[in-house]
């Protein structure tokens, strides 16, 4: 087996990004050779129009699905075979990602509903973790996203999250929505 084939197999099965130094040790080649092999593998995948690519994330290398496959993956995610997070868990994950460190109470206040179950699920799956405790009565836990979150999102750091402003409707739309849900005021 060639080092290139072995590298492809390693990146295919890994659940976390693998550092170049570790790849060099496993393949018994230099880090320079690993860098060359990573370039060659990347080109090979690109040339054959593969549905996957290799990318550096989280201080290592891993295979990811190619962005133009997302519509198919989105459809697949709706199938019974695919495992997915609930809409509530995704909302909570977004709140934690953008507001971290954040407490259970703060998440519930932002969402307007109890979020304990979603927080427990995200913590159990390893997407969020305890970041510390607030110096308040009861010392509530505050959460932050984990390295697994960064890896699964294909990010090297939180600074690569898309700007939240890109997903907020204009003020005029927010005002119309708020007026729609305000109780009518009795006329004086």
Image: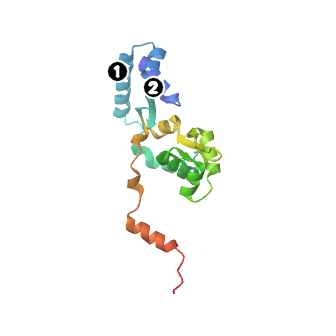
Secondary structure category for the residue under label 2: helix
How far apart marks 2 and 1 lie (CA) works out to: 13 Å
Q: Is residue 18 visible?
A: yes
Q: Residues within 10 Å of mark 1 (few under 14, many from 20)?
A: few
Left or right: 57 in relation to 82: left
How far from the left and from the top, in percent, is residue 131? Answer: 55, 38
| Residue holding disc 1 | 36
How far from the left and from the top, in percent, is residue 172? Answer: 38, 68
Residue 134 image-quadrant placement: top right
Q: Is residue 80 visible?
A: no
Judging depth in this view, the residue of 19 and 96 nearest the camera is 96
Q: Nearer the viewer, mark 2 or mark 1?
A: 1
Residue 123 image-quadrant placement: top right
Which residue shows up at 38% across the image and 63% down it?
Answer: 170
Which residue shows up at 48% across the image and 38% down it?
Answer: 150
* Mark drawn on residue 108: none
Query: How is the protein colored in the picture?
Result: rainbow
Furthest toward the bottom, the residue is 188
Secondary structure category for the residue under label 1: helix
Which residue shows up at 45% across the image and 25% down it?
Answer: 8
Judging depth in this view, the residue of 166 and 106 nearest the camera is 106
How far from the left and from the top, in percent, is residue 182? Answer: 52, 73
Which residue shows up at 41% across the image and 52% down it?
Answer: 164
Judging depth in this view, the residue of 188 and 17 nearest the camera is 188
Of the numbered discs 2 and 1, the one sitting upstream in the chain is: 2
* Mark drawn on residue 8: 2
């Amino acid at each position: 087996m060639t080092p290139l084939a072995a590298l492809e197999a390693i990146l295919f099965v890994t659940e976390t990004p693998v550092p170049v130094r570790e790849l060099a040790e496993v393949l018994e080649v230099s880090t320079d050779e690993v860098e060359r092999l990573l370039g060659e593998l990347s080109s090979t995948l690109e040339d054959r129009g593969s549905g996957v690519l290799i990318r550096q994330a989280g201080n290592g290398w891993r295979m990811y699905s190619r962005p133009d496959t997302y519509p198919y993956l989105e459809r697949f995610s709706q199938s019974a075979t695919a495992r997915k997070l609930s809409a509530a868990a995704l909302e909570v994950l977004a709140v934690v990602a953008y507001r971290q460190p954040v407490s259970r109470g703060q998440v519930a206040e932002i969402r307007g509903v109890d979020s304990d179950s979603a927080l427990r699920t995200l913590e159990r799956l390893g997407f969020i973790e305890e970041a510390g405790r607030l110096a308040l009565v009861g010392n509530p836990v505050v959460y932050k996203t984990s390295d697994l979150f960064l890896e699964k999102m294909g990010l090297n750091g939180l600074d690569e999250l898309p700007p939240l402003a890109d997903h907020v409707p204009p003020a005029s739309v927010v005002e119309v929505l708020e007026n729609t849900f305000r109780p009518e005021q009795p006329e004086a």
